[in-house]
Image (cartoon, rainbow, N blue to C red):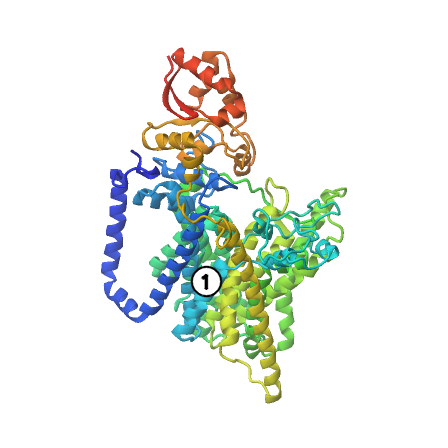
């Protein structure tokens, strides 16, 4: 019996017991070596540790309850994620075999699925439950990680423990649990606010002229899906010209996808925490730091390397953030050690800055090399569809749409940058010179884009896809984002090199700069992929920016409300600044409350809580329970393959993606000849790896010549042939008669049958 898919938890293999025992012994040995330090830490920090644990448990319990109302792994790309998890759990070695392309390894970042699969294996929890438990665990880890990160940032700022922990708790909840402002539009729509002209101007698909109503909750199936499809440019007939995806973490948790960009979130907070430790390190980061601090260096290399394994989109971003922190740390250390004079702007001189950049590049290069080496087996089998970078030449994002999606975190992070300006001014002697470095940091990306567009135009002078007003329409949104990124970068460099360094603020400014540059970058460039647009680029970088700007904004709230005043003001101006501060606080509170409507209404819609007819008697975390109740034959077949059948590949019907096809292979992790064809093309870039496989499967189920028909079974190493409702749907009801004929002739043997599903074993003659 296989304990990984619902078997007896006690029946762990010797290898698994050895692995678990070795991990436990190693952890115990490390704890024993540092027992005095750990005891002292818990004695001094038990309150914040307890707060963090309580936050984790509260968020986990909330999401487990929500998921238990809608646990089915049967929609969107959940079957894909579930299949990868099962393929990893079912693998005897690595890289694991692709459950939807036998004979090939998985061509996707499966690090997060690996973690969930190993926890399922070691605990004996069935993978359909482990899947949903993982979805509930990720937001809990994210919220707890952000609490710890922000707490430490503010403690370095001199904050007391209570406000630091409180700010961290609220920031963690905000990044994890808040939605964008599309909920306000949904509420206005369902209440009948605005006429046809207004909703034509809003231009969000599905929100046309409302009929009005008395409800305070939006209606319609999965209305909360629209909040992730706001940024678009529509023609007069409603055709999308710039279809994009703009998820936020809350939406991902509500939907229940276990995608790479979701599973990486806790590891992102780990990398950021280690980056903070690097930034405040008393020793300059460089190759010597790698040698003198091997433990810290190994932890950072492992954390960075794991990001590529879990979600490759995060790897270059956080390498850049680590490098920015290293530049700030090294320049500050060198200035204080050698008492080097700063330039007229208060920043490190050009030579010191250049040296800091060089040392940071060496450090980043060493960490990247170590991180890649640690996960080398993954890279040896990984094949990406990414084909380079191109300038965006299509429509630009409307500022209104941007504010709906990213207005709250961008506003809070921008306030942090603005609040840092007095500290910047206090460090700069020649204030008039301030505009030049800021302009350089701001305009450079735009000029690079202009050059790239000029090249594209010269190569394709007749290309009709180039948007009208290509440059001017893009400046409206891109320029403010670049200016904020430039200001944050310059402030960080100046404050890092000041005589009284504010490394905690430098860290927050680095996150803000990275977030603003990401958002601007999505307006200027896109990754070349099979989608042929910036859809996936916007999807991934907006998700990253939400986290970075959310954390920076949380620090900004504290800095504005309770932080030290760095600029002395005359009495007559103090009242003006106080009034401005109160206005900002009111606006910030209003935006946060407005963004809270979306998650509340969406959870009520998803769960049916407090609604007529809602059932709360059949809650479960078993993601395949819908099969047990609705398709018992398939459920029994999956259980038999997981717990009783011998090893071996299967074959089942080939059908469209985002459907119930490929369900048996996905729910067992056993490789089939071909699953979701479109996803294989996305992962591998083309169809060369699976060309002809669909025809071969059709031959297996529809052929009339015994030996020739069944030859593909030998070619693909298939042991188990599935005959169920999808096989009959795809290849006709004659499938049963045909398989019985092959069994009578000695090619197959019935091995399992339940309800409308039969599984044959290939035995040959």
Q: Residue at x 38, y 47 (%)?
A: 374
Image coordinates for residue 115, horizontal then vertical, percent = 38, 46
Q: Seen in the image, is 124 located left or right of residue 360? A: left
Viewer-proximal residue among 152 and 131: 131
The kind of secondary structure element at disc 1 is: helix
Viewer-proximal residue among 463 and 177: 177
Image coordinates for residue 171, horizontal then vertical, percent = 47, 65
What residue sits right under mark 1 in the picture? 172
Q: Seen in the image, is 466 located left or right of residue 129? A: right
Callout 1 crowding tier (Cα within 10 Å): few <14, some 14–19, many ≥20: many
Residue at the front extreme of this rendering: 612
State the count of labels: 1
Camera sees residue 98:
no
Q: Residue at x 53, y 54 (%)?
A: 602
The image quadrant where one finds the N terminus is: top left
Residue at the bottom extreme of this rendering: 571
Q: Is residue 566 above or below residue 46?
A: below
Q: Is residue 265 above or below residue 549?
A: above
Image coordinates for residue 357, horizontal then vertical, percent = 51, 62
Q: In terms of image quadrants, where is residue 629?
A: top left
Q: Seen in the image, is 208 located left or right of residue 271? A: right
Camera sees residue 580:
yes
Image coordinates for residue 765, horizontal then vertical, percent = 37, 12
């Amino acid at each position: 019996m296989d304990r990984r898919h619902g078997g007896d938890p006690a029946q762990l293999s010797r290898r698994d017991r050895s692995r678990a025992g070795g991990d436990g012994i190693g952890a115990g040995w490390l704890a024993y070596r540092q027992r005095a330090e750990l005891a002292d830490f818990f004695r001094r920090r038990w309150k914040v540790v307890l707060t963090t644990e309580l936050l984790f448990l509260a968020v986990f319990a909330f999401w487990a309850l929500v998921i238990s109302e809608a646990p089915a792994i049967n929609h969107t790309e959940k079957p894909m994620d579930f299949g990868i998890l099962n393929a990893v759990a079912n693998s005897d070695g690595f890289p694991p075999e692709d459950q939807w392309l036998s004979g090939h390894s998985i061509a996707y970042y499966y690090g997060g699925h690996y973690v969930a699969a190993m926890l399922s294996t070691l605990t004996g929890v069935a993978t359909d439950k482990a899947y949903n438990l993982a979805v509930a665990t990720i937001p809990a880890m994210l919220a707890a990680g952000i609490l710890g990160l922000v707490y430490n940032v503010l403690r370095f700022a001199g904050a007391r423990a209570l406000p630091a922990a409180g700010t961290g708790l609220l920031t963690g909840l905000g990044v994890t649990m808040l939605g964008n402002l599309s909920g306000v539009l949904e509420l206005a729509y369902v209440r009948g606010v605005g006429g046809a002209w207004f909703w034509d101007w809003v231009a969000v698909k599905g929100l046309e002229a409302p009929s009005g109503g008395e409800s305070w909750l939006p209606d319609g199936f999965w209305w909360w899906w629209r909040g992730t499809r706001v940024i678009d440019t529509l023609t007069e007939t409603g055709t999308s010209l710039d279809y994009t995806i703009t998820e936020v973490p809350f939406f991902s948790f509500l939907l229940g996808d276990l995608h790479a960009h979701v599973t990486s979130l806790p590891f992102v907070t780990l990398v950021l925490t280690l980056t903070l430790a690097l930034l405040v390190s008393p020793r300059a980061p460089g190759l010597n730091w790698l040698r003198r601090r091997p433990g810290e260096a190994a932890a950072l290399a492992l954390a960075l390397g794991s990001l590529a394994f879990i979600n490759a989109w995060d790897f270059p971003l956080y390498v850049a953030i680590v490098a920015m922190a290293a530049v700030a740390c090294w320049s500050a250390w060198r200035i204080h050690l050698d008492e080097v004079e700063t330039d007229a702007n208060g920043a490190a001189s050009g030579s010191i800055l250049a040296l800091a950049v060089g040392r940071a590049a060496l450090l980043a290069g060493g960490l990247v090399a170590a991180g890649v080496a640690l996960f080398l087996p993954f890279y040896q089998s990984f094949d990406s569809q990414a084909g380079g970078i191109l300038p965006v030449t299509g429509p630009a994002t409307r500022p209104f749409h941007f504010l709906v999606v990213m207005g709250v975190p961008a506003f809070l992070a921008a306030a942090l940058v603005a609040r840092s300006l007095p500290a910047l001014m206090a460090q700069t002697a020649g204030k008039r010179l301030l505009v030049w470095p800021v302009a350089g940091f701001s305009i450079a990306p735009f000029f690079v884009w202009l050059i790239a567009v000029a090249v594209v135009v010269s190569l394709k002078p007749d290309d009709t896809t180039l948007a009208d007003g290509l440059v001017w329409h893009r400046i409206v949104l891109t320029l403010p984002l670049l200016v904020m990124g430039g200001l944050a970068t310059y402030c960080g460099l100046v404050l890092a090199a000041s005589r009284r360094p504010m490394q905690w603020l430098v860290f927050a400014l680095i996150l803000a700069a990275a977030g603003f540059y990401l958002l601007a970058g999505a307006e200027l460039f896109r990754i070349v992929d099979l989608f042929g647009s910036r859809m996936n680029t916007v999807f991934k970088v907006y998700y990253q920016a939400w986290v970075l700007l959310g954390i920076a904004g949380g620090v900004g709230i504290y800095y504005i409300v309770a932080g030290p005043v760095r600029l002395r003001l005359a009495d007559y101006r103090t009242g003006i600044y106080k009034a401005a501060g109160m206005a900002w606080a009111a606006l910030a509170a209003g935006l946060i409350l407005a963004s809270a409507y979306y998650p509340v209404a969406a959870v009520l819609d998803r769960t049916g809580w407090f609604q007529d007819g809602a059932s709360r008697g059949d809650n479960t975390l078993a993601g395949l329970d819908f099969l047990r109740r609705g398709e018992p034959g398939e459920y029994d077949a999956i259980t038999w393959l997981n717990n009783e059948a011998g090893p071996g590949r299967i074959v089942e019907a080939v059908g469209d993606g985002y459907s119930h096809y490929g369900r048996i292979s996905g729910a067992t992790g056993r490789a089939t000849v071909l699953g979701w064809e479109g996803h294989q093309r996305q992962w591998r870039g083309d169809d060369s790896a699976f060309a002809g496989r669909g025809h071969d499967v059709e031959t297996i189920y529809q052929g009339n010549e015994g030996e020739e028909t069944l030859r593909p079974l030998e070619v693909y190493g298939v042991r188990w042939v599935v005959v169920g409702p999808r096989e009959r749907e795809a290849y006709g009801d004659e499938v049963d008669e045909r398989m019985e004929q092959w069994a009578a002739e000695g090619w197959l043997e019935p091995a399992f049958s339940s309800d409308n599903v039969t599984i044959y074993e290939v035995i040959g003659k």
